Amino acid sequence: MNIGEKLFELRKEKNLSQEEVAERLNVSRQTVSKWETNQSTPDFDKIIPLCELFGIGAEELLTGKKPEEQNRENEIPKEENRIPTREEIRSKSAKVVSSSVLIYILAIAFFIVAVAVLCLDPVIVTAIFLGVVGVATARIIRHYMSIPKFEKTSKEIKETEIMKQMNGIVGAICFILYFLISFTTMAWHVTWIIFIIDALICQIIRLFFMLKEEKINE
């Protein structure tokens, strides 16, 4: 809203005519009309009298914004728009990974009990198992894709390299165990679960480093 529209709006709110405004400000009616149609703007010495006449501040008159609107623009960004700190991200990551690890463990326990103990249909059990594991994995992926990227410190880079090496060793061991157990038992329809266990161990390793870092920060 420009100054002319604001003056027109304020005059209507006060139920004043252009003649009445002109008389109180000691100007002509044509001058008031030009102000309201933006053909000219009030002189500097008329700003304060206009504000006193309409009961507003100079900022509201010149910008056309009410005080509450101005305050909203100057408000601190809402909490949901705030960028989280490293510590907050680590804490949330630890919660997401730990809860996902628990889901992995429960899924593996369900698979073993359902197939080996309850002798349920392996196809149905496998479908349920993969669905649960998929949900846990999706939670982890979604979390790490949503967090902002920070430049890693030398310590974080070192820890990442250690995690990769440990995960590589665990992966190699699980790969060897998979073939040894599969060829020995010929239970190929069950032994593939070793790869899920491999993923579970990798997440536990990640969780270990997260909790260790969080403890150090405390």
Image (spheres, helix red, strand yellow):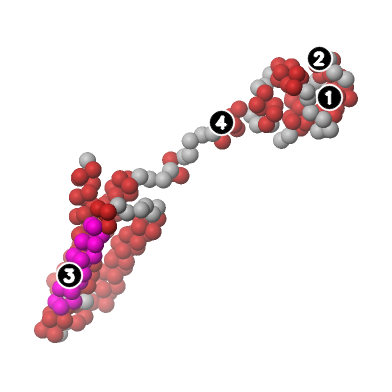
Q: Residues within 10 Å of mark 4 (few under 14, many from 20)?
A: few
Magenta-tinted stretch: 158-177
- What residue is drawn where x is 59% and y is 29%? 68
Residue that numbered label 1 is attached to: 32
Q: Give the quadrant of the N terminus.
A: top right
When asked about the image quadrant of residue 106, the answer is bottom left
Residue that numbered label 2 is attached to: 24
Q: Residues within 10 Å of mark 1 (few under 14, many from 20)?
A: many
Q: Is residue 130 visible?
A: yes
Q: Position of residue 211 (x, y in %)?
A: 21, 50
The kind of secondary structure element at disc 4 is helix
First reached walking from the N terminus: tag 2 or tag 3: 2
* Side of 150 where 45 appears, left or right: right
The kind of secondary structure element at disc 2 is helix
Q: Which mark identifies residue 74? A: none
In magenta stretch: residue 43? no
Residue that numbered label 4 is attached to: 71
First reached walking from the N terminus: tag 3 or tag 1: 1
User: Eyeballing the image, is 183 above or below 106?
Assistant: below
First reached walking from the N terminus: tag 2 or tag 4: 2
Q: Position of residue 35 (x, y in %)?
A: 81, 28
Residue that numbered label 3 is attached to: 169
Task: State the CA–CA distance, disc 3 to disc 1.
Answer: 84 Å
* Side of 216 where 151 appears, left or right: right
First reached walking from the N terminus: tag 4 or tag 3: 4
